Image (tube, helix red, strand yellow):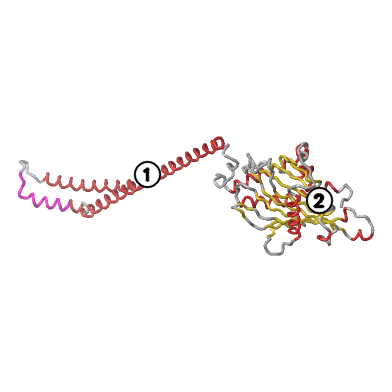
Amino acid sequence: MDEMETFRDLLVKQVDSLQKFFDTCKDTFSTEKDGDGSESPNSDHKMKEQLAVAAAQAFDFRGEALTFKTTSAGVLIALQHCLDIISQREDLWRKKLEKEVEKRKKIEELYKGSELTKQRPKLTIMSGPDYEEGPHSQIGEEEFFDAVEAGLDKLDQEQLYLEKLRQNSVSEGQTKAETHRLTSEIERITMEQLQYAQSGVEDGVWTLFAEDGEMRMYKREEEIDGLAVDPLKAVHTVKGVTAREMCQHFYNPDVRFEWETTLEKMTVLERLSDAACVVLQVHKKVWPATQRDALFWSHLRKVPKDMCRDAHDAWIVCNNSTEHPNFPSNNGKFIRVGLTICLMCQTYLDSSEENGSPPTRDNLTCKITYCAVVNPGGWAPTSVLRAVYKREYPKFLKKFTQYVFEKCRDKPVCF
């Protein structure tokens, strides 16, 4: 606007100068005429003299004309610049409008998607156990793991109520027999797991993934049909308990609710003997995973002395998945977990026994070897499963061994 005002002042000044020149010329011609309107003989000479005087007093006409052209050109340039600025602002507002329209479309799509998500459970709740987890699940791996982790934390808080849940949870066995259809299988798998537990982890195929004090946990990454079924082997040492005490608490169904916090219900389907039984366990649901159950036989036995010569004694508990005609797998809302678990414990005494004094809990050291292969069944992201294993296995072993120590520390030593 300042430039426009300057141009305006210049133009007004130039127009006034031109008008003044033209007025002078007009006055000179009008005064040289006769009374009758005819020009006198001396008029030409006088007119030339007056024009010469007026020209001497006037301005440079050519220079003013050039200045006028330049000024008018400057005005046009300034106007064009203003129009360009207006056009740019219009483009800017048009782009903003397009962005707002695009944002509105995205928000409308997200709103429609959220409405469909809210309606989805009502529409497909009866579609099967793999509704909430599966290859086509809408839940990402990070959200899946966060949900599982939050559910596990909630289960830890429910541990205070385990005493109430334990009552009336374990039923009496339905059958008891010296010879059973599972006897040969139990013998074979238990001895295989004993040899597996006694083998070392120095062959290069095991990877250390957790370490806490005396506890070391190793794994091998394996997948079956796209599911992570990583074999696990843990080595731990606990003071003040014997191998038998550790294994009896791990085997005994009557005390399982005291240390297994993920159980919702457990039923002993068959008691093969005092040291063997068939168990059906229903685990608590952890959203968004489908609820799991496990059907397996469990066997407790003392390891022969010739298989553990360096230890005072050794015991083993072996759990392995099996089938039962009255409880088929994946029937209803549960997914059946496949498992093979072995807990081998060895008792070591210090030199006080050699002096003839009876062993006390201060003289006891229990070496624990825990092996597990678990197939979760169904479908879940591999990265989520491995993250859960890494978190839960060390916590379970530490919690269980501490539980056994607290239960036995005021009781007589039991070999």
How far across and how far down the image is residue 101, in percent?
43, 41
Q: What element carries label 2?
A: helix
Q: Quadrant of residue 313?
A: bottom right
> Mark 1 belongs to which amino acid?
Glu
State left or right for residue 272 relative to residue 108: right
How far across and how far down the image is residue 326, in percent?
69, 40
Closer-to-camera residue (197/94) = 197
For label 1, the crowd category at 10 Å Cα-Cα, with few meaning under 14, some 14 to 19 and many 20 or more, is: few
Magenta region: 38-53
**What residue is disc 1 on?**
90
How far across and how far down the image is residue 335, in percent?
64, 44
Closer-to-camera residue (317/262) = 317
Residue lying at the far right in this picture: please name it. Answer: 356
| Magenta span: chief secondary structure | helix
The answer to whether the residue labelled 2 contacts the one labelled 1, judged by CB atoms less than 8 Å apart, is no
State left or right for residue 107 relative to residue 400: left
Indicate whether residue 44 is drawn in magenta. Answer: yes
Can residue 180 be seen from the camera position used here?
A: yes
For label 2, the crowd category at 10 Å Cα-Cα, with few meaning under 14, some 14 to 19 and many 20 or more, is: many
> Mark 2 belongs to which amino acid?
Met
Residue 127's place in the image compared with 298, above or below, is above
Residue 187: mark in rendering: none
How far across and how far down the image is residue 380, in percent?
60, 48
Closer-to-camera residue (275/24) = 275
Q: Residue at x 69, y 41 (%)?
A: 282
Cα distance between the residues tagged 2 and 1:
81 Å
- Work out which quarter of the rendered image holds the N terminus and state it: top left
Q: Quadrant of residue 352?
A: bottom right
**What residue is disc 2 on?**
246
Q: What element carries label 1?
A: helix
